[in-house]
């Protein structure tokens, strides 16, 4: 079983009359003893993904699991 897992994570924001897609369809899993690194260009969704994992924002789509239990 994964310690931390994300399935199909997406996050969209509404800004005035536009929809900003900050994250789309992210999957990951972290097993015991593994380290997960996150790298990417500015604006690629790194901070958004971390906010979803930390529970600071809900995903628009997808789910986050910690030790097999859904966080949101």
Image: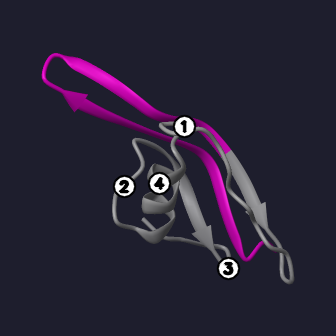
Secondary structure state at the residue bearing disc 4: helix
Viewer-proximal residue, 48 or 9? 48
Disc 4 versus disc 3: nearer the observer: 4
Q: Look at 34% across and 66% down and name the residue there.
A: 56
Quadrant occupied by the N terminus: bottom right
* Residue 57, position as x, y percentages in the image: 34, 58
Q: Which mark is drawn over residue 67?
A: 3
Please identify the dominant SS of the magenta region: strand
Q: In this picture, which residue range is highlighted in magenta?
A: 1-26
Q: State the image coordinates of residue 28 (x, y, percent, origin top left).
A: 73, 54
Q: Residue 58's mark?
A: 2
Q: Which residue is mark 1?
A: 44
Q: Quadrant of the C terminus?
A: bottom left
Q: Residue at x 51, y 39 (%)?
A: 42
Q: Is residue 22 magenta?
A: yes
Q: How far is the residue under mark 1 from the one under mark 3?
A: 27 Å
- The vertical placement of 61 against 37, above or below, is above
Task: Report the Cα–Cα distance between label 4 and label 1.
Answer: 9 Å
**Residue bearing the label numbered 4:** 47
């Amino acid at each position: 079983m994964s310690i931390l897992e994300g399935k199909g994570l997406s996050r969209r924001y509404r800004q005035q009359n536009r929809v900003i897609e900050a994250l789309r369809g992210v999957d990951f899993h972290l097993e015991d003893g593994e380290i997960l690194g996150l790298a990417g260009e500015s604006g690629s969704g790194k901070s958004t993904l971390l906010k979803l994992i930390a529970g600071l924002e809900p995903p628009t789509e997808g789910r986050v699991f910690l030790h097999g239990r859904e966080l949101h």
